[in-house]
Image (cartoon, grey):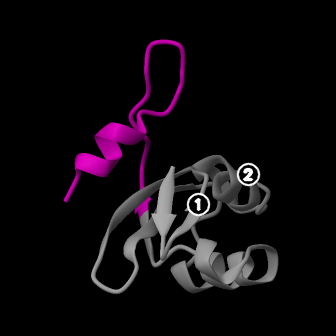
Amino acid sequence: MIIVSGFKVFPNEVEDVVQAHPKVKECAAVGIENEKSGEAVKLFVVKKDKSLSKEEIIAYCRENLTAYKIPKEVEFRDSLPKTNVGKILRRELKDIK
């Protein structure tokens, strides 16, 4: 769980919305430190379509999520770290600086 200005944000909520975007293959949301709100949402995205941009992801989130759930950072990756059964390892992503 990510605590943004006292509000609870569940990573699955953000991921489910972003995953519905037609240009997104897979994604993972983690909490990162933020001076203003304590924590903020950071999104790791694997593109399905090379033309996908950070601005497009943020705009899509603005349409479908409450303001405090919108990712402050978006990072594109070629793949996401996973367990043997295919579950995304959020802790590994959170440790990446």
Q: Identify the residue position indicated by label 1 in the image.
A: 8
Say whether residue 74 is left or right of residue 8: left
Q: Choose top left, top right, bottom left or bottom right for residue 80.
A: top left
In magenta, the rendered stretch is 76-97
Say above or below: 80 vs 21. above
Query: For residue 53: magenta?
Result: no
Q: What is the residue that sits farthest to the top in this orientation?
A: 84
Q: Residues within 10 Å of mark 2 (few under 14, many from 20)?
A: few
Q: How many marks?
A: 2
Which amino acid lies under the numbered mark 2 shown in the image of this protein? Answer: Asp
Kindly tell me whether residue 7 is visible in this rendering: yes
Q: Quadrant of the C terminus?
A: bottom left
Q: Considering the numbered disc 1 on the image, is that residue within a helix, a strand or a loop?
A: strand
On the image, the x and y values in percent for residue 81 come to: 38, 34
On the image, the x and y values in percent for residue 31 come to: 41, 59
Say above or below: 55 vs 85. below
Sequence-earlier tag: 2 or 1: 1
Q: Identify the residue position indicated by label 2 in the image.
A: 16
On the image, the x and y values in percent for residue 71 come to: 53, 73
Say whether residue 68 is left or right of residue 43: right
Which amino acid lies under the numbered mark 1 shown in the image of this protein? Answer: Lys
Q: Residues within 10 Å of mark 1 (few under 14, many from 20)?
A: few
- Nearest the eye: 9 or 12: 9
| Label 2, label 1: how far apart the Cα atoms are | 16 Å
The majority secondary structure of the magenta stretch comes to loop
At 58% from the left edge and 60% from the top edge, which residue is drawn? 8
- Nearest the eye: 38 or 42: 38
Q: Choose top left, top right, bottom left or bottom right for residue 18.
A: bottom right
At 64% from the left edge and 62% from the top edge, which residue is drawn? 49
At 75% from the left edge and 60% from the top edge, which residue is drawn? 17
